[in-house]
Image (spheres, rainbow, N blue to C red):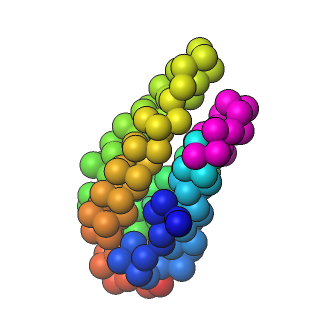
Amino acid sequence: MTFWPWSKELEVGIAVIDEQHRWLVEQTNRLHEALQAGSERELIGEILEGLMDYTMNHFIVEEELFDRLGYPESAAHKAYHNRFTEQVMSLLLRHENGEEVGMDALELLKRWLTHHILKVDKAYVEHFRKHGVC
Ligand SMILES: [Fe+2]
Ligand SMILES: [Fe+2]
């Protein structure tokens, strides 16, 4: 059974963003599978690093749109992104120091992404649409 199945509810309705969110959910599921299988630290580290890179890239895509479209909530939204990046960085550091952080990472990813997509990302959709992004 999939740990976190993608659902319609998670869609913001902007293709490029939905595709990226979907990838993040898939990788969260991949991390879950790796933990269930008792996979080696290397694989878990690799998934975490991949998530870190991809998340940063995704945040840049959103933030460039905020700047281009004059999104009024940009500063608060960027602060959420920055805080999350710090949390993932700290997990990676702990991982590199030999700690087992898989479960903490899984918990953070699911909780943070769910809240962020449903509440924080969905809040920009109307503004984006008004400016022709679909
Ligand atoms: Fe997002
Ligand atoms: Fe966001």
Q: Position of residue 94 (x, y in %)?
A: 53, 21
Question: Left of 97 or right of it: where is 75?
Answer: left
Question: Left of 78 or right of it: where is 18?
Answer: right
**Residue at 27% in and 63% down:** 119
Q: Which residues are magenta?
A: 36-53
From the viewer's perspective, is residue 14 above or below residue 1?
A: below
The one of 134 and 120 positioned closer to us in this rendering: 120
Residue 52 located within the stretch drawn in magenta: yes
Q: Position of residue 99 (x, y in %)?
A: 54, 20
From the viewer's perspective, is residue 85 above or below residue 4?
A: above
The one of 53 and 132 positioned closer to us in this rendering: 53
The one of 54 and 59 positioned closer to us in this rendering: 54
Extreme residue toward the top, this view? 97
Q: How many marks?
A: 0
Q: Position of residue 63 (x, y in %)?
A: 46, 56
Name which quarter of the figure residue 16 lies in: bottom right
**Residue at 27% in and 49% down:** 76
Name which quarter of the figure residue 97 lies in: top right
Predominant SS of the magenta segment:
helix
User: Does the image show residue 11?
Assistant: no
Name which quarter of the figure residue 49 lies in: top right
**Residue at 30% in and 57% down:** 115
**Residue at 48% in and 72% down:** 6
From the viewer's perspective, is residue 108 above or below residue 12?
A: above
Residue 49 located within the stretch drawn in magenta: yes
Q: Position of residue 77 (x, y in %)?
A: 32, 52
User: Does the image show residue 96?
Assistant: yes
